[in-house]
Amino acid sequence: MIKVYTSPSSTSSRKAKKWFSSHQIPFKEKNFFNEPLTDDELRKMLQMSENGTEDILSKRSNIYRDYEDKISQLSINELIELIKEEPSILRRPIIVDDYRMQVGFNEDEIRVFLPRTVRKQELTHALLLTGI
């Protein structure tokens, strides 16, 4: 199941939800301001990220600026507690399934969440249009 971690004020979150709905892809939304993230959810995000905190933390947030010099010195448990206390430090949306994670909304990259059969059909169609 695809989970979309959102915030209500995020335009990118709204775009991601609209994209999944328009492609009839089921997803579960979790607004991390109304429903705090669990330790397990945060650990999974950190494990799935290629660049650790760089991928999921918003450098534009005021909280990030307040903690910028200290973040690299925090233990994983301290970082998780900081995120739980200050969820605005996260980029959004964060989209995860069992195998992938995407942070932010990108119309091209989000296509990896399309079922494989749909992606294959689209590729075949594109190849037919180009005559390859």
Image (cartoon, rainbow, N blue to C red):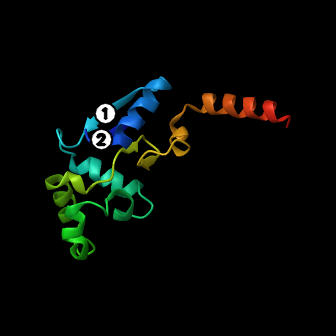
Between residue 43 and residue 58, name the one nearer to us: 58
Q: Is residue 57 above or below residue 69?
A: above
Between residue 99 and residue 28, name the one nearer to us: 28
Q: Is residue 113 above or below residue 37?
A: above
Quadrant of image for the N terminus: top left
Would residue 91 be seen by someone viewing this image from the given angle?
A: yes
CA–CA distance between discs 2 and 1?
Answer: 7 Å
| Res 110 label | none
Query: Mark 2 touching mark 1, by CB under 8 A?
Result: yes
Quick one: SS at disc 1?
Answer: strand
Q: Residue furthest left?
A: 85
Quadrant of image for the C terminus: top right
Q: Tell whether 113 sits left or right of 66.
A: right
Q: Which residue is mark 1?
A: 29
Q: Position of residue 56 (x, y in %)?
A: 35, 57
Q: Residue at x 21, y 75 (%)?
A: 70
Q: Residue furthest top?
A: 24
Q: Residue at x 44, y 48 (%)?
A: 102
Residue type, label 2: Thr
Q: Position of residue 106 (x, y in %)?
A: 49, 45
Q: Tell whether 50 sits left or right of 7.
A: right
Image depth: mark 2 or mark 1 in front:
2
Q: Identify the image quadrant of residue 26.
A: top left
Q: Position of residue 99 (x, y in %)?
A: 47, 45
Q: Which residue is mark 2?
A: 6
Residue type, label 1: Glu
Disc 1 crowd rating (10 Å Cα; few below 14, some 14-19, many 20+) is some
Q: Residue at x 16, y 58 (%)?
A: 81
Of pointers 2 and 1, the one earlier in the residue sequence: 2
Would residue 2 be seen by someone viewing this image from the given angle?
A: no
